[in-house]
Amino acid sequence: MSHYEVGKGRPPKHAQFKKGRSGNPRGRPRRLPRAEIESQIGKDMREIMRTTRTVGGKTVTMQQALLMVAVNQALQGKVGHMKQVIELLRFSYRDNQARKPNLELLDGLNVDMVMRDPKLRELWTSILANLAKLSKTD
C-alpha cells in the first residue's frame, strides 16, 4: 500500500500546500463594521437643518431644534415632553461621555421619580426654563 503516491491522506504533488504559503491565502473574511446606534443617532442629530424661529431664520442642528421644541412644550407643563427632554439629556450624556469622561450631568436620574415628586418636578421645570433661555440667547 505504501507504494501508491496518491491516495487517502496523500494528495497529488500539484495539489499539496506549497512551503511558505498559506493554505488559506485570502483568509477569513473581515467583519463589516457596524454602527453603534447611539453614536450614529448622535451624528445624525448633529446634521444641519434649516429652521425658522420667531426672530427670523436661524441655522441650527436637528438636536438643537428638537430640544428647543421639547423644552418649550415641557415649559407649558406637558409631562410627556418633560420626560422626553430628560431622556434627551440622558441620551446626550451617554453620547458625550466618550468625549468627556468626567461628565456627570444626569448619572442615575430616575425619570419616573422626577415626574412623581412635585419638588423634583419643579426643579426640572426651572432647569428646563434655564435651557430655554440659553437656547434663545445663542
Image (cartoon, rainbow, N blue to C red):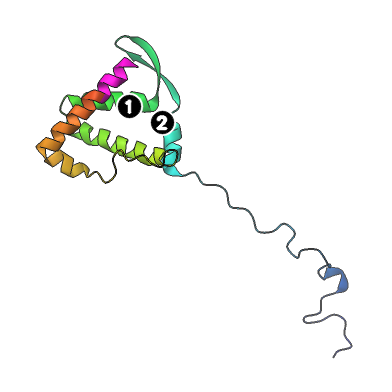
- Location of residue 60 in the rendering, given as x and y in whole percent from the top left corner: 40, 20
Q: Give me the residue at 31% from left, 20% from top.
A: 135
Whole-percent x, y for residue 50 in the image: 41, 17
The residue indicated by pointer 2 is 45
On the image, the x and y values in percent for residue 125 come to 18, 29
Give the amino acid type for the residue marked by disc 2 in the picture.
Answer: Met
Q: Residue 99 location, x and y as percent?
A: 45, 38
Q: Residue furthest left?
A: 118
Residue 122: quarter of image: top left
- As rendered, which of 120 and 86 lies closer to the eye? 120
In this rendered view, identify the residue nearer to me: 93 or 9: 93
For image coordinates 87% across by 69% down, the residue present is: 14
Q: Is residue 84 above or below residue 133?
A: below
Q: Is residue 60 left or right of residue 124?
A: right
Q: Is residue 26 above or below residue 16?
A: above
Residue at mark 1: 66
Q: Residues within 10 Å of mark 1 (few under 14, many from 20)?
A: some
Magenta region includes residue 10: no
Q: Which residues are magenta?
A: 131-138
Q: Amino acid at mark 1?
A: Leu
Whether residues under marks 1 and 2 lie with C-beta atoms below 8 angstroms apart, the answer is yes
Q: Residue furthest top?
A: 56
Q: Is residue 125 above or below residue 1?
A: above
Quick one: SS at disc 1?
A: helix
Furthest toward the bottom, the residue is 1
Q: Is residue 135 magenta?
A: yes
Q: Earlier in the sequence, mark 1 or mark 2?
A: 2
